[in-house]
Image: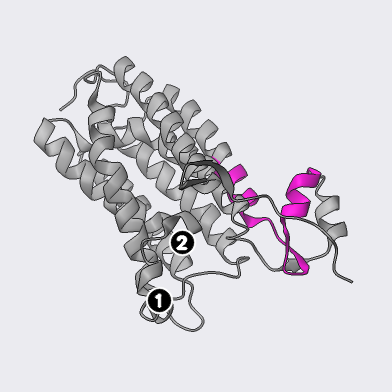
Amino acid sequence: MEENIQPIDPIAFTLGPIQVHWYGVIIGLGIALALWVAMREGEKRGMPKDIFADLMLWAIPIAIISARIYYVIFQWDYYSQNPGEIIKIWNGGIAIHGALIGSVITASVFSKNRGISFWKLADVAAPSIILGQAIGRWGNFINQEAHGGEVSRSFLEGLHLPEFIINQMYINGAYYHPTFLYESIWNFLGFIVLILLRRVNLRRGELFLTYVIWYSIGRFFIEGMRTDSLMLTESLRMAQTISIVLIIGAIVLMIYRRMNRNSDARYLDKSNE
């Protein structure tokens, strides 16, 4: 028997003919808080005051576009038949790996033009990135997407979740794993770990590489629970494949840079070069 549970309205408010979606509001909130955290830490590390604000002017639109392109490429069977849907990112459908690729390329070019170490920029930004991801997953919650396989209501109640989360996980007559929540919690924990690691004064670049490893480990396992994965082949999930590549790549790069003494500069050093 189907339960009479109404999902949360994805429309936060309207401004005349414009509908403002919760998805966009939450993503915007995540970006704003992430920027604030990065700007505060950047000032402490002797970086130009507006460096992250300037970077965001380029990184945000490029990240959104690259995230959407990435998603559309792996859902091309659908979007080739519905090209008008490609621009409707407010309905969801942006891939974080696509956003990260676009952001890293943008930051690399930006840091070179500004004469600032890319690794220092990335280290300062790392906690902000994972914080933004943790908040952004709640946009998926509102849209009832990025969920896992079917479960019972008693299973969700056994997790001691608030009623509003349990009810929102009721989709088309069934309850589902709140994988958005699992990833959000993992990312919040990662944010705390990275903040604590700032005090360790790691070699420059290693805080960012730790972020890559931490996020990728969580994403690998959580992705295996999801029902909406982008697929590389019929049996190979794209996000899991990339996660493995990133984990191995980050570890190898960290070892290589230490062996070749390419990372003698430390996180707390004031030099921006």
Residue 27, given in percent of the width and then of the height, sits at 47, 43
| Amino acid type, callout 2 | Gly
Q: CA distance from mark 2 to mark 1?
A: 14 Å
Residue 15 higher or lower than 148, as above or below: above
Residue extent of the magenta highlight: 162-187
Residue 103, given in percent of the width and then of the height, sits at 29, 47
- Classify 10 Å Cα crowding around label 1: few (below 14), some (14-19), many (20 and above): few
Residue 76 higher or lower than 167, as above or below: below
The residue drawn where x is 35% and y is 79% is: 80
61 or 2: nearer the viewer: 2
Residue 113, given in percent of the width and then of the height, sits at 10, 36
- Please tell me whether mark 2 or mark 1 is closer to you in this view: 1
74 or 90: nearer the viewer: 90
- Give whichever of discs 2 and 1 has the lower sequence position: 1
Secondary structure of the residue carrying numbered label 2: loop
112 or 20: nearer the viewer: 20
237 or 1: nearer the viewer: 1
Residue 240, given in percent of the width and then of the height, sits at 48, 66
Q: Is residue 21 left or right of residue 95?
A: right
Q: Does residue 16 appear anywhere in the picture? A: yes
Figure disc tally: 2
Secondary structure of the residue carrying numbered label 1: loop
| Amino acid type, callout 1 | Asn
The residue drawn where x is 46% and y is 75% is: 231
Q: Residue beneath label 1, please? A: 82
Q: Is residue 222 left or right of residue 42?
A: right
Looking at the figure, which quarter contains the C terminus?
A: top left
Task: Residue 218: say if magenta.
Answer: no
Task: Residue 180: say if magenta.
Answer: yes
- Classify 10 Å Cα crowding around label 2: few (below 14), some (14-19), many (20 and above): many
Q: Residue beneath label 2, please? A: 93
